[in-house]
Image (spheres, rainbow, N blue to C red):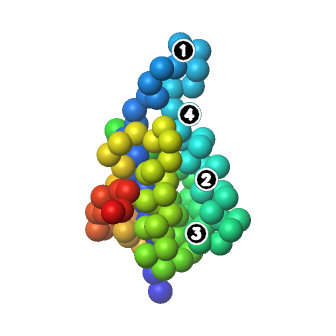
Amino acid sequence: MARTVVEIHVPLRESPRLSETDYAFPWIEEIEEFLTEMEEQGPAEVFDVGEEFGDVYVFFISGAEEAALLNVASRVAALDGVPDGAFAMVTDDEAEEFGSGRRVKLPLR
């Protein structure tokens, strides 16, 4: 049976007000740390490593019911420094490619 996976798509935009020597996307590391904390606390697990996909960076979570996963995705989108325009794709572990499934605007309201 297929497991629910939520892909968190974040626009790949550089953080403003960085010097030329700063990493342009510090929010990627912040999201990874947040998702690791969520995995340790139990509401979601990191399904796969995040990766760049076109003009977005995609994070993958699974291991819980859809509502709980979307709640975690919403919290990711609301983190300080995360670019506006994030969205989730609700899919499963049998999907053949990224971005297939149902699109959900983040953060949830």
Q: Which residue is under mark 3?
A: 44
Q: Rate crowding at label 1 as few (under 14), some (14 to 19) or many (20 or more) other CA atoms within 10 Å.
A: few
From this view, report whether residue 87 is shown above or below residue 14: below
Residue nearest the viewer, comparing 17 with 11: 17
Q: CA distance from mark 3 to mark 2?
A: 11 Å
Query: Amino acid under label 3?
Result: Ala
Q: Which residue is under mark 2?
A: 34
Q: Quadrant of the C terminus?
A: bottom left
Q: CA distance from mark 1 to mark 2?
A: 24 Å
Residue 23 placed where, x, y %?
57, 25
Q: Rate crowding at label 2 as few (under 14), some (14 to 19) or many (20 or more) other CA atoms within 10 Å.
A: some
Query: Amino acid under label 1?
Result: Ser
Q: Secondary structure at mark 4?
A: helix
Q: CA distance from mark 4 to mark 1?
A: 12 Å
Upstream in sequence: badge 3 or badge 1: 1
Q: Rate crowding at label 3 as few (under 14), some (14 to 19) or many (20 or more) other CA atoms within 10 Å.
A: many
Residue 42 placed where, x, y %?
65, 72
Q: Secondary structure at mark 1?
A: loop
* Residue at the spot 35% in from the left edge and 56% down from the top edge: 106
Q: Which residue is under mark 1?
A: 19
Upstream in sequence: badge 2 or badge 4: 4
Upstream in sequence: badge 1 or badge 2: 1
Q: Residue furthest right?
A: 40
State which quadrant residue 56 falls in: top left
Query: Amino acid under label 2?
Result: Phe
* Residue at the spot 60% in from the left edge and 57% down from the top edge: 35
Q: Which residue is under mark 4?
A: 26
